[in-house]
């Protein structure tokens, strides 16, 4: 696999950093998560297939352990606010001096610098500061965020994983690591580059919710069916629109492609309510009308297309994209690590004796899984 | 830069493929876009800094040119429906035989296989089939899509770029290329892995729009201000919620963190309408209340935090994440290529004589930029 042999040290945090670690693990890397001593419950649902060591980072011996592990790692991912790692004595200056080949990835909301760098925040705030939240949502509604997909994951963990992979590639040439400053505000804005750069085109220019791509048009919207489910309609091109209204049983005179959008939405709403989702799929599946059912998380893995593609395993998405010769392999079906499950084994592998380890447990520097004692 | 020296051949298409090419270009690759002969207008707003050659792919000589270019390329990106490249005689079997080191990236909505593989679609449809659209939007509304951010860009071009980079990394070890099958349905679902995998946690379990992260909670929502602008509020943790109610001038008894969400939303709505956005920012900026202004595309580049970070250049987002030693450099400031602008130069560089080139123009195989004649 693409990242076989790559060792990742992931300092435990919320969504974005574990997601970055998950991607790297899915594509072959060995990911060791550093958990805080005393954190029993495992709420990291992206932790499948990772190892866990539990350390007390407030104890100098705990910090030393991280340094020792970082010397033998290829990648470190840290999720803390700007300055925290430096205060712990684990800043990039120190760790890159120990190990110049280290890729030191810093996964934050606001980035390492700037007036908000030390402020708390969440996906919704980073999405707001990126400029993109102002574009999302229908015109009669407040702007609405797509749960925490946009900044935590797309503009966060995924952008960070891209940066890590680029840095690993560059390291092949230079022999050197570097710092990856992954800000969710910036990542989100960058993923939305098209939304920024295309504003000059005629398809924009109206208020939020009145443009072609942002719910303004009747031919690019979600509609409710007779049985209270939903279809997605995305017939942008004239030849696809023709197929759409054919399937709806409407004349193009009644429903011109670029007519009165609001009136036409009312017409389409009424039309789609005439049949169930199943009936609409029977009409539209496999055509070019650009109509597809809005599937739930339970339905998506079972949809015939996704089933045949093999897109899901155990009900969760498999790694994307699919590399033909060296595909990723989802860790999603492996077990979640117990916090501290691999503490002993990992320390032993980097030269700590059983005596050392026992002492560290006594001194409250490390946690080992109770069941392993 | 990480991708210096990498040659990318990008067959022109809509949003996702150009975005993938844009990312690779921003991180140092040379991207040559193959445009369709006769397409004069340049609507690819992600094309800055790319070169353009204009070819007639229905003419065998045009196809031969692509084969010749692919032999000298590291990456090919094609955006066509499954089977189109094969029909043109440019399928992966042929091109990988010519050039076993080629990374052959196939950027589609539904993927190369499966019952929908030959159907037309757009972002909204792929998002629907991924299962994620069913999670987005407030409870009293139909599901709503975040323009075309989710599938075209996050689950599309960005996932494809990740796959290409992983394949380039793997190629360093194996010396071989491979096919990257980038399906937007799968990419989108994969980026939403947390949304899939975390359903078991207590923070989920209610209808869309009634959970903590999906607009259900008063402390994780967007609110309108006195002057008709919006703030984002994301105070998930108790210590941040305390700062939030403090800044709002409310007692936590009046507004318990986990009280009646709908009632508390009404209270918060009234509160936020009491002051302008500027006044709220004066209260909350730099605190841990997790409150941030919802900025427009014009405002985001000028916000003090983004300004100091240098997140934008010429009003558009710079490449993310920031690699400390070998950062990406936005091509967004460079000019858009004219369709066919580099046809002559590119063909000359791969050994075509001026006589050859003129003949190809005469026979309608290629287009050169009028101004270059």
Image (cartoon, coloured by chain):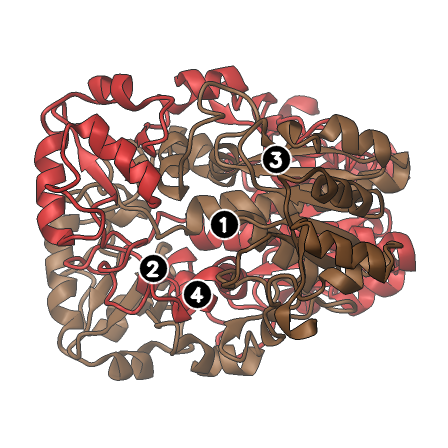
Chain colours: A red, B brown
Q: Are marks 3 and 2 on the same chain?
A: no
- Tag 4, which chain? A
The nearer-to-camera label among 3 and 4 is: 4
Distance in Å between CA atoms under marks 4 and 2 = 33 Å
User: What residue is shown with label 2?
Assistant: B235
- Tag 1, which chain? B
x, y percentage for residue B167? Answer: 76, 39
Disc marking residue A321: 3
Is there any visible trace of residue A67 in the rendered image?
no
Judge the density around disc 1: few (<14), some (14-19), many (≥20) Cα neighbours within 10 Å: some
User: What residue is shown with label 4?
Assistant: A198
Is there any visible trace of residue A93 in the rendered image?
yes
Distance in Å between CA atoms under marks 3 and 1 = 18 Å
x, y percentage for residue A319? Answer: 60, 32
Front-most of residues A336 and B360 = B360
Q: Residue at x 32, y 62 (%)?
A: A135
Front-most of residues A136 and B76 = B76
């Amino acid at each position: 696999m693409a990242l076989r042999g790559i060792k990742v040290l992931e300092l435990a945090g919320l969504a974005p950093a574990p997601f970055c670690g998950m991607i790297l693990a899915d594509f072959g890397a060995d990911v060791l998560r550093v958990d805080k001593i005393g954190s029993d419950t495992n709420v990291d649902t992206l932790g499948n297939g990772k190892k866990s060591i539990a350390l007390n980072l407030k104890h100098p011996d705990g910090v030393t352990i991280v340094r020792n592990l970082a010397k033998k790692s290829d990648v470190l991912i840290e999720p803390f606010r700007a300055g925290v790692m430096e205060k712990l004595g684990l800043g990039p200056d120190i760790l890159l001096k120990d190990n110049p080949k280290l890729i030191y990835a810093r996964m934050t909301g606001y980035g390492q610098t700037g007036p908000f760098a030390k402020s708390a925040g969440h996906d919704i705030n980073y999405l707001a500061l990126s400029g993109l939240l102002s574009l999302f949502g229908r015109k009669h509604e407040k702007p609405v965020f797509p749960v925490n997909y946009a900044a935590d994951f797309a503009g966060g963990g995924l952008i960070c994983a891209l940066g890590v992979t680029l840095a690993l590639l560059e390291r092949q040439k230079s022999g050197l690591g570097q710092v990856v400053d992954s800000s969710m505000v910036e990542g989100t804005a960058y993923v939305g580059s098209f939304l920024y750069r295309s504003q000059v085109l005629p398809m924009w220019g109206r208020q939020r919710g009145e443009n072609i791509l942002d719910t303004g048009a009747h031919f690019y919207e979600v509609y409710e069916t007779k049985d209270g489910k939903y279809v997605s309609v995305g017939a942008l091109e004239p030849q696809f629109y023709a197929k759409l209204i054919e399937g709806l049983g409407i004349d193009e005179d009644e429903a011109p492609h670029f007519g009165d959008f609001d009136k036409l939405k009312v017409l389409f709403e009424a039309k789609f309510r005439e049949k169930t989702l199943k009936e609409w799929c029977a009409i539209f599946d496999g055509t070019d009308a650009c109509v597809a059912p809005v599937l739930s998380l339970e339905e998506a893995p079972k949809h015939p297309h996704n089933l045949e593609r093999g897109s899901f395993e155990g009900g969760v998405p498999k790694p994307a994209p699919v590399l033909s010769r060296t595909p990723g392999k989802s860790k999603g079906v492996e077990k979640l690590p117990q916090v501290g499950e691999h503490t002993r084994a990992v320390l032993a592998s980097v030269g700590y004796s059983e005596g050392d380890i026992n002492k560290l447990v006594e001194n409250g520097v490390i946690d080992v899984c109770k069941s392993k004692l």
